Amino acid sequence: MREALEGSLAIARAVAMAKPDVVAAYPITPQTHIVENLSKLVAEGDLHTEFVSVESEFSAASVVLGAAATGARAYTATASQGVLLMSEVLFNIAGLRIPLVMTVANRAVGAPLSIWNDQSDAMAVRDAGWIHLHCASNQEAVDTTIQAFRIAEATELPVMVCMDGFVLTHTMEVIDMPGQAQVDAFLPPFAFSRALDSADPRTVGTLVDPGWFAEMRHSHHAAMGRALGVIEKVDADFAKLTGRASGGLLTVTGDPDARVGILAMGSVVGTLEAGLADFGTEAGTARLIKLRAFRPFPARALREAVAGLDTLIVIDRAISPGLGGIVGSEVSAVLQSMTAAPRVLNYALGLGGRDIPESVYPALIAAAANPLAPRFAVFDADLDKLMPEDR
Amino acid sequence: MRAIDTSLPPQRPATKTAEFKPSLLLKEDHHLCAGCGEPVAIRLILEVIEELELTQNNVCILGHGCYGSFIMLMDVDSTLCLHGRAPAVATGMKRMRPGVAIWTLQGDGDMTSEGLAEIMQTAARGEDVTCFMLNNGVFGDTGGQMTASSVIGQRTKNTIEGRDAGYHGNPIQLAEILSQMPGAGYVARGSVHNAASINATRKMIRKAFQRPMDGHGLALMEILTMCPTGWFVPPGEGAEYMMESLGKVYGLGELKDAGAASDDDSDD
């Protein structure tokens, strides 16, 4: 049913339709509304779940770990500093191959303190071993949330559903909410093969000596590789059921014949699509690549998506000081094996909630036309605000 | 003398004739909600710092909460640290600057929820720092959710039917716990709900700075502050609501004073 909903409320309803056994979370802006709405659904009797209000994100992640280890369907949500406080547990969850779902309402990481959107939080834990799916709209976030439970349970890997804080979480959008019957058909009850069972005792997680650690990591990496196919299949199955796909691993839109491509993750994709529509005729068209799966990283699909491009601009919503962009660096790395790889320009945009206007589109196209354009830049930084030595 | 008839409107509107604020407060105005108790508590702290002649000899470490907006309004050396970690940061500063009054400004969410380990361990080590907890029983800055200090029956954004001991657990009475710890030299709980409580709290704040400076260990100064927005009550009813809810659980007064014997406080 199509409804005008705030992103956070829509996510709470999507989570409720997945019927989680346990929800544990700690309030943090801009994730708060998701958890508030879930607690409201519990209070109103519309969601039967153990809702645990814990004292920190560190405990929230630990509670869902414990619950999921018993075979429960578990969910949590956080953002920014919460992701980082959880980070030790996030590695633990993934290393133990515990399937659960977490929404990250992407927000900058301090210091300096910022409550506004960028993707520094998810990037900081990119190596924790979680599947990372980035959503460009609230519709995608709703659909991806439901898909995430199936992906997690099929791969025995935790899934992080990333949606831009405020830009998506606090924005009203007309969303086609799936029906409960559809979700029930799509998402069968969770049966965890390695669930703790006192009738058949087993150990989940123990000291691993050097004779086994490398194999555990290899196995985790291999499972991530297999997850590429699972993500695509689950999205295709969801599309069969609802008529809507969420973008598989990545999607290519815009002008397929353009010589300039722009790759981005999250809500900025919508801005670029609008920019292409409004400025494309005058400034020149571009191929737009919406990267949905950041982990596992879809190297092969990406090489196919960029074939024929002269220049690929990669947008980063975070920065790795001393390196530059993170998505940009990874894209550059996987394009190395191409015989005719495009030149990669990597620009950080919208850090700490800096507004990204549609007019960024012609500016990016102009950079692509400039042979002397810098390989990396904080594209929208106002250099006049900086100390001379930092310009 | 003829009594003023307060039922009539004033003959001329009230006018502001002078500023009255401690020197460490850069502006009289704040942008917190109407009826908030935090500006009153912070003002008291700054007044006491001035009285104790610590204006050039103190550092404030702020946690995360509405009070954080005062970082730009206080003429005080300050650091905004991570949520809940202020007592640990204060420890590092105090060890390097033993002669400086190091104080933390935290809320109940910051101190009893996220940062419980830090305040307990800092008290266990007996660090000579002053820790303020502005207790309103909610995460005000995040929009009014339950903290570890929310009282039974309290309605918050995530305890819509009221905090239930069986489902949400019981409130943590941190001051009572710390008063049992040898490393905490001064533990008191004040309030800012009326003039008498403000005066009493002011005296406690004075000792909360003096005791750690005299080497008696950590001081925990809890101050009950009104949060009408987070309690879903009109601003004018915050004080009454507070004493009917938090006030019933969190008794006011000094819980411990290791320096009472050597008290030369001439303020009384």
Image (tube, rainbow, N blue to C red):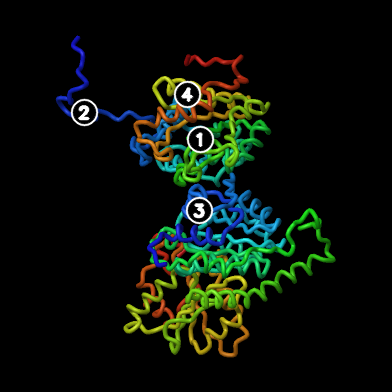
Residue for badge 1: B153
Q: What element carries label 4?
A: helix
Query: Disc 4 sits on a residue from what chain?
Result: B
What label does residue B14 carry, if any?
2
Q: Is B266 located above or below residue A102 in the figure?
A: above
Q: What element carries label 2?
A: loop
Question: Residue placed at 52% from the left, 33% from the top?
Answer: B132
On-image quarter of the N terminus of chain B: top left
Of the two numbered discs 3 and 1 in the rendering, the one whose residue sits closer to the viewer: 3
| Cβ atoms at labels 1 and 2 below 8 Å apart | no
* A53 lies left or right of A225: left
Q: Give the amino acid type for the residue marked by disc 3 in the picture.
A: Asp
Q: What element carries label 3?
A: loop
**Disc nearer the start of the sequence (1/4):** 1
User: Which residue, as the protein is rendered here, is positioned at the far front?
Assistant: A181
* A376 lies left or right of B89: left
CA distance for labels 3 and 1: 22 Å
Residue for badge 3: A46
Query: Disc 1 sits on a residue from what chain?
Result: B
CA distance for labels 4 and 2: 29 Å
Respond whether the residues carrying marks 4 and 2 are from the same subunit: yes
Q: Residues within 10 Å of mark 1 (few under 14, many from 20)?
A: some
CA distance for labels 1 and 4: 27 Å
CA distance for labels 1 and 2: 41 Å
Of the two numbered discs 1 and 2 in the rendering, the one whose residue sits closer to the viewer: 1
CA distance for labels 3 and 4: 45 Å
Of the two numbered discs 1 and 4 in the rendering, the one whose residue sits closer to the viewer: 1
